[in-house]
Image (cartoon, rainbow, N blue to C red):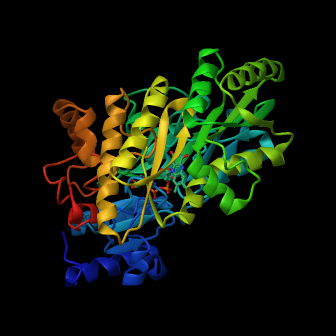
Amino acid sequence: MVDPKSVQFQELVDELKAVVGDDNVLTSPVDLAVYQCDGETLDLARPDLVVLPVSTHAVQAVVRLANKYRVPFTARGAGTGLSGGATTIMGGISLVLTRMTKVISVEPDNFIATVQVGATNSSISKACERYGLYFAPDPSSQKASTIGGNLAENSGGPHTLKYGTTLNHVAGAKVVLPDGSVTIFGGKVRDALGLDLLGVFVGSEGTLGVATEVTVRLTPKAESVETMLAYFPSVEMGGQAVSDIVAAGVVPAAMEMIDQLTLQSVENAHQLGLNSEAGALLIVELDGARAAIEVERAVVIRCVDQRAAFGVKWAADAGEREAIWKARKSAFGALGRIAPHAYVLDGVIPRSKLAEAIYGIAEIGRQHEVLIANVYHAGDGNLHPALLYHQDNEAEVVRVMKAGREILELCVNLGGTLSGEHGIGVEKVVAMPFVFSESELRAMGWLREAFDPSGLCNPGKVLPNPKSCGESGARPLLRHRLSC
Ligand SMILES: Cc1cc2nc3c(=O)[nH]c(=O)nc-3n(C[C@H](O)[C@H](O)[C@H](O)COP(=O)(O)OP(=O)(O)OC[C@H]3O[C@@H](n4cnc5c(N)ncnc54)[C@H](O)[C@@H]3O)c2cc1C
């Protein structure tokens, strides 16, 4: 690794500027500080420099220079990730793709669009709106997060329950491989032949190369959409209603729940007229043919009534639907009113274990004296407990990390897993052996080495190595300074 104070490093900076222009290379400490973490703020590590290319050709040149000077590089989209995936824990280049925002083509007859990777998730749907099409994966960060980040994390969202994750909606990707060569995985048609390298790349968290363009599959808008909001005396009762709905044979487009603490924060922040005395708020969305929805709606009403729902309201129009979704999609931001930092977990459990998980998480919070707000993709059993803390209170940070680890263990012990959609990044790297055997991890390591034998592409992420506990990178992260 080149010393950032060396003459050689200055030569790298000069060569990068020649490729992408002076304005697209940042080196001042103030500029670099902006890129020292993503949405997971327990892990802070400044890059040595930030490069903002605007084309595949420029990304390729940057990756080639990183190889020439043996400097690590880490792709970065909007930095909304919640597992430290874009954090440069080994230093080096933060390769920021947010200036690559072009919608290259929309092919409504083929239900596909090709975009540069810096396009935001919601800008894709916007570009296709006039054709009655949209991009189905909808992370709550969709107004900011990029399709490159969505691809790398295999992101989901509230509508994953019915529509699946990003993987189910991507046809192809143009990728700069870690050695600087350019390739295309997948294509524009279904079932491209050969080994499924697109499948390997999606969800690889920036460790197998840098995507520069993505061809996404578009979904026709449903004939009819019905959105319901209901309150419950407790999250357990809401969770039981969710199980009942699925057991009755209805697969809604989305079933999302927030607990009382989150509900109160959202109401304080946005004054949406929500009942913040309720134990939980559940949103159920149905979509499809009008006749089918009428039947499903009756089933949903019966199921929520049986679990003591109150204040049940169906959106009368698009404006009311948007207001209902605001209660859910603004949840994490609203928690900032309680504490400046939130460690958002992403555990998955079998849906039938929801009540057990809820009790367990509350108990862990009590034991470690950590305030926990809960947001659930309830239909998928994907839990987002947000552990609230102040970064300068070291004792609190240690308690938060311990509680976080125990919650993940709880999810795994209940038959679930570490992550539903936020990825492993650096945050959960030491927890990988909870779910994967040595031989499974070794096989993943071989795959990674085949793509990146020099080990320069987003090093220190996803796969644990002997140094992952204690000192995982060239930079001492907060979590490693305080505990392990
Ligand atoms: C308020 C909030 C709500 C959220 N809600 C959801 C949700 O509902 N569902 C969900 O799944 N996630 C959610 N997230 C997490 C996050 O938004 C997603 O993981 C998102 O896909 C990250 O996109 P990004 O552009 O910010 O990527 P970044 O955070 O910049 O990067 C994420 C990872 O992708 C890699 N990467 C980025 N671009 C590329 C590229 N072009 N090629 C290769 N690798 C690349 C990075 O190296 C890193 O490992 C939420 C986050 C926040 C803050």
Q: Is residue 300 left or right of residue 408?
A: right
> Could you tell me if residue 27 is visible in this image?
yes
Residue ID at (79%, 37%):
313
Q: Is residue 341 left or right of residue 306?
A: left
Taking depth in this image into account, of 406 and 292 the one nearest to the observer is 406
Q: Residue furthest right?
A: 316
Taking depth in this image into account, of 189 and 163 the one nearest to the observer is 163
Residue ID at (78%, 44%):
321
Q: Is residue 312 left or right of residue 96?
A: right
Q: Position of residue 75 (x, y in %)?
A: 40, 59
Residue ID at (31%, 56%):
399
Q: Is residue 264 left or right of residue 275?
A: left
Would you identify the image quadrant in which residue 159 lies?
A: top right
Taking depth in this image into account, of 91 and 328 the one nearest to the observer is 328
Taking depth in this image into account, of 13 and 257 the one nearest to the observer is 257
- Check the image and report above or below for 471 versus 439: below
Q: Position of residue 20 (x, y in %)?
A: 45, 73
- Check the image and report above or below for 136 versus 334: above
Where, quadrant-wise, is the C terminus in this rendering?
Answer: bottom left
Where, quadrant-wise, is the N terminus in this rendering?
Answer: bottom left
